[in-house]
Structure formats: structure tokens, C-alpha cells
Image: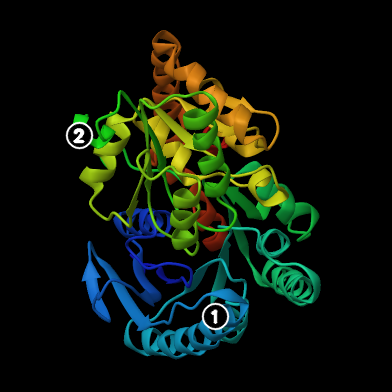
Amino acid sequence: MGQPCRVLFLVENGDVPTDRRVWNEAVTLTKAGYRVSVICPRRQSRRLHERIEGVSLYRYPLPELPGIGGHLVEYAVALPATFVLSWVVFFREGFDVIHAANPPDFFYAIARVFKLFGKKFIFDQHDLVPEMCLARWSGLRLRLTHGLARRMERATFRTADVVISPNESYRRVAIERGHVDPDRIFVVRSAIRRDVFKEGRPRPELRGGKKHLVTFLGTIGPNDGIDQLLLAMRHIVVDRQRRDIQLAIVGDGDVRRDMVDLCARLGLTDFVRFTGHVSDQRVLADYLATADVCVEPAPKIPLNELSTMNKVVDYLSMGRPVVSFDLHEVRDTVRSAGVYVPSNDPGDFGDQILRLLASPDERERMGRDGVQRYNDVLEWDHQRESLLNAYASLLHRQPAPTDIQASRS
């Protein structure tokens, strides 16, 4: 037998193993006989180098600063640090493939250097960076960031030997905007393993003394719609005079402090709990198991319209009905387990939450549909074969036996 293929993952926008998509991919490849290394930022006082489940992890310190200036400082540290550590891995462990996750889209520069040594490059789309710029910036900052993002995206698509997309919308972007051969694009959905939330149990105390619990689980960023969710909650509490509902916002992000301040200004402190970052999977599972309704309040903008939100897969895995604005990829993921608000109207969003809370039979039916959707399509095992087929195509090997079209459903 020949030497096993060696893979180097490059990640900037999160640490590993916390980044669930990267970790699932890394562990899947390791179990399939690949030798896997990962370079990523150091978070939560993790070790600079360690091996977990056969995956070799290399980390570097990275500052987290707000605003466009903070992003520039972050990238100015991340790119050279990743490049240096790539050489460390090159000489210490070796690699045949660079597998880079975005954002940002600058790892193509490192890949181009190592392609001179015969290495392959896989681009793993996590986000659409030009659309992120459109959602975050305006004026001169938008013109500068959007133009740079488009150039880096084009360069990344041109450099990639294979592209991995999380859904069909991103795949179309790779084809139409990136001019990538469709045969070189593989859809690997962001999914979770079946055992992640298996120990979740309802805990009445999480309702904060209220009759119902509504749960948001995820990042609190500028495009995630927490302001819309708080306005929907104000509509529920003030306009509809419902004081028997608790909202749990489970997660952290760039704008959490701003959202806590907004919550106080809206007079909702007694009805909303911000938990901050929760790393304990059992606690996350308990919040989902206790929730009557889960929410995806991301507003209807181009970035959100095309993106699959990880949180909705979590909701479905636990059989929770979902209220969301009518986003194309969220609807395609959730289907009959969700209610879709056609406009960015927080009042309508709040009313749909109330309607579901008043309809236990409908919630139960939606929960069953969600679990079936998760079991049939969205569990990680359904994505495994597509990932392995992407590598088989790259390395001209026999593809995995399962038809990957099932994972594109």
C-alpha cells in the first residue's frame, strides 16, 4: 500500500475542534485513512499544539478587535502566522492537500506557493464574503472591502482544484461567479452527528418561571437579526400583553453587548436571558429540549437568503419547530418543520411565535417532520460520502460507494 494522503486544514474564522464543520470533516478523513493536520487561531486557552482523535492541531494567538480596523489587524496577524505554521507542518508532518475554509478568502495565496511543490488545493466555502461586506459596510468602506473581497474570491476559485459548497445556492455562485467546472464542485452540508445532543433533557427552570420558552442558539453578529428578535419580543410582551414567555438567547458575538443594551431600553430584561457563550453540549441540548419554539431571526438580505444556518439543523435534530423569515436556503433546509415570515416585520414574526405556542398539535407535527428531515438528509453521515467523493475526485481514486446525490436533496 502507498503512503496515506496527508491533508492540511487552514482555518481563520474559528478554532478547532469548536468549528463543527471543520472538525467533522477532519475526523471523517482521519477515520478514512487520511493523515490530517489543522492550523487555526488559539481560543479559550487551548494548547498551541496537541493531537485529538488522531488530528494534529497547530494554533496561533489571534487578537479579536471590533470594526473594520480590527479585521485588518486580525488578518495581518493570521496570514503570516498561518504561512509560517504551514512550513512547520510541511517539514514536520508533510501534506499533499491544503483544505482551506473561509472567511476570509486569502488562503489561496498560501496554496499557490505550495502548488509549486505539487500540492493540491480544496476551497471549502463557509460564507460568501462579498455578500458579507454588502451586509456590514456602506460608503467608502463598502467600496474598498467589497472590491477586495470580489478579487480574492475570484483568485480563490481560480486556484482551487476542488470546491466544497454547503448548499446548492453557494454551488451556483461557484459556477456562475467563480466559473468553476460543475464537476469539480461537491455539496457537503453543514450537519451534526447524531450523538451531539442525545443527552438533552427538558429543564423547567430554563423557562425563567414562565409558561413557554423560545430559544435562539447561535452567533450574535450584525447580520443575525437579534435586534429584530428583540423587537418581536417587545411586540409579544407590550403589544400582545403576553408575559408568560421567556426568550433565551444562547450564544455570543460581536454585537452581544449592544443587544443587551437594546433589550434593557425596550424594557424586556425580565423576559429575555442572554447566556453568553456556552461550550457544554449538554447545556445546549437542554435549552433545545426545553424550548417550545426555536427561532431564526436573520433578516431577508442576499447573504442570509443564500446561506444555510447551522442553528436550524440543531433545531431539527431535537424536534423543535422553527420560526424564520422566508429565506431560500432556510426554507429548503427546514421545509415543513418551519413557519416562514414573508417580510422583515418583527411584529409578524412575534405573531407567528404566538400562533405556534397556541397550537401544540402543530408544534408536535412540525417536530416530527424536523426529526425526519434531519434523519433522512441532514445528519453528518449523509454528508460523509460527498466529502470522500470530493477527495476521490481530487486524487483520482475510486469514489465512495454511496451516491452523493442523496446529500444534495
The residue that mark 2 highlights is: 205
Q: Position of residue 83 (x, y in %)?
A: 49, 87
Which is nearer the eye, 147 or 193?
Answer: 147
Name of the residue lying farthest toward the top: 361
Distance from the alpha carbon under mark 1 to that under mark 2: 39 Å
Query: Where is the C terminus found, in terms of image quarters?
Result: top right
**Residue 154 picture quarter:** bottom right
Residue at the image point whose x is 64% and y is 47% from the top: 304
| Residue at image mark 1 | 70
Q: Nearer the viewer, residue 67 or 84?
A: 67
User: Which quadrant of the view contains residue 360?
Assistant: top left
- Number of disc labels: 2
Q: Is residue 43 left or right of residue 122?
A: left
User: In this picture, is 81 found above or below 345?
Assistant: below
Viewer-nearest of discs 1 and 2: 2
Identity, as a three-letter code, of the amino acid under mark 1: Gly
**Secondary structure state at the residue bearing disc 2:** helix
